[in-house]
Image: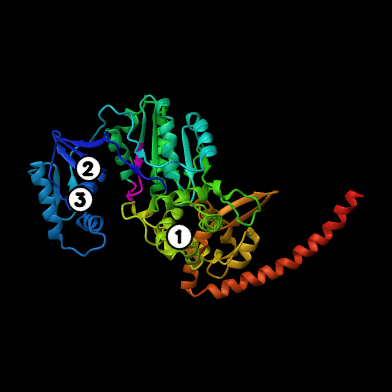
Amino acid sequence: MNSFVKPDTEAAVGFGPFAFYRQQRLVTCDGVPLALGGRALDILQVLVEHAGTFVSKQALIARVWPDSVVEAINLRVHIAALRRAFGDGGRYILNHPRQGYCLAVPLALQTGGERHNLPVRLSPIVGRDTLLGRLLREVPRQRLVTVAGPGGVGKTTVVLRVAELLLEHFAEGAWFVDLSAVDDPSQVIVQVAGVLGVEPGALGQRLAHCRILLVLDGCEQVIEACRELAQMLRETACGVTLLLSSREPLNLVPEHIVQLPGLALASPHEAGYPMAVCPAVQLLVERIAARQQGYAPSERDLAILALICERLDGLPLALELAAVQVDALGLAGVLEQLECGLSLLSHGRRTAVARHRSLQAVLDSSFERLSAEEQMALQRLAVFDGPFTLETAMAVISCTQLSVGQVPRLLSGLVNVSLVMVQRCAGVERFHLLHTTRAYALEKLRGSGQWQLFHRRYRLQEAWDTPRSSVQSSRQQPQHCAGLL
């Protein structure tokens, strides 16, 4: 994955004489930096995200101390530090005995004359030229474009690059809104309004005559609220273009959906395939070279690199996490560990948002949003080690808890959230799970104790289908030959 940092012109959130630079973790008063500790800044960030509403003490503690057990006194100490720094007197940070704390002042975006808040990209984008070209043609002509795909596929990287390249096309610029940490639907409009420096209730009115690109990242977290926001802006602000990244589309009639696949893979089994120029291999080599100065892969290395890329479905996040392990395990060791599951990729970047700290976290965030029936279906689909049809899925995974009639709807839902992939060939739909998704679901299925049952059903169905396929082929063969005579 590409790394991002804020430039010196980072937009700040302003309230009164104060400015909060989130990425720089800096608060200034009339331009003079204030001395605040890390925990106080973490608390302030949560209060800014929920400005105008109370945040419970339990929610604040969970966000600021996610891995520790602390007393409420710890929270009060840091709240007191914020109030002293602000000369608060209860004016900025309100306290309610039962509801918690609230940053009770209007927020304004301080851009310093900038027409965007897009982060600076530190590394090149690999293997996305064709897709970027398509988006650059389509985004200016559409009001709503969603880049959809599985977690870790690089959606954020793509939409930010599109916004960079189209910046001059929009008179009021391009603005990035990170929704990855928002779990309260009511805060979506608050978050967007905060970035733009307007009151939430006046968002549609203020944007009514603006030509602006809004980039909403991580929409799957609050998909219904994003759908409502898109509908509201469509009715009130005809000059606003929405560019979304999401694991599932909004499914609105005017929505233009662009599916983002993993980076193109090279197969070591294909003779003459130039593996060194394969985008997935290029990214993996680049990430290893960033840690091992002067690294240049041998021919043998290229074959192993291609196998790692294939095993990880060309997902940029997974490739980055795998590259970290090459120092300790070597290429062959990484490949060997990947054959045993995804535990190798369970420890990732501490500075990333929670959903991108590891591949496990990415898949957990998708799995937890599924219904109980969808979770059950996904686990059972892991018995398929290759493409399958709807009919085969219905025969294998249905049971008393999951009726045959439910399977089409559940399968469609899993496709919609990018956990099951679909290919249409000659009018026939075939489904499959990415290797990474299958490994995750397989672990869940084994943990449920149902692996043997559904694997046996899969093998029986496979044996049943094979003779039928042979009969069909033998019946078709004479017709084919007759056509040649």
Pointers 3 and 2 in contact (CB under 8 A)? no
Q: Is residue 196 visible?
A: yes
Earlier in the chain: of badge 1 and badge 2, it is 2
Against 6, residue 167 (above or below) is above
Q: Nearer the viewer, residue 275 or 484?
A: 275
Q: Residue at x 43, y 56 (%)?
A: 323
* Image location of residue 431, percent across then percent down: 60, 56
Q: Disc 3 and disc 2: Cα gap in Å? A: 15 Å
Q: Residue at x 25, y 58 (%)?
A: 62
Crowding near pointer 2: few (<14 within 10 Å), some, many (20+)?
A: some
Q: Disc 3 and disc 1: Cα gap in Å? A: 32 Å
Q: Main secondary structure of the magenta part?
A: loop
Earlier in the chain: of badge 3 and badge 1, it is 3
Mark 1 residue type: Ser
Q: Is residue 378 left or right of residue 241?
A: right
Mark 3 residue type: Ile
178 part of magenta stretch: yes
Mark 2 residue type: Gly
* Image location of residue 339, percent across then percent down: 51, 66
Q: Residue at x 8, y 46 (%)?
A: 84
Q: Name the residue that disc number 2 marks.
A: 52
In the image, the segment drawn in magenta is 176-185
Q: Name the residue that disc number 1 marks.
A: 371
Earlier in the chain: of badge 3 and badge 2, it is 3
Label 3, secondary structure: give it: helix
Crowding near pointer 1: few (<14 within 10 Å), some, many (20+)?
A: few
Label 1, secondary structure: give it: loop
* Image location of residue 75, percent across then percent down: 15, 56
* Nearest-to-viewer mark from 3 and 1: 3
Against 375, residue 107 (above or below) is above
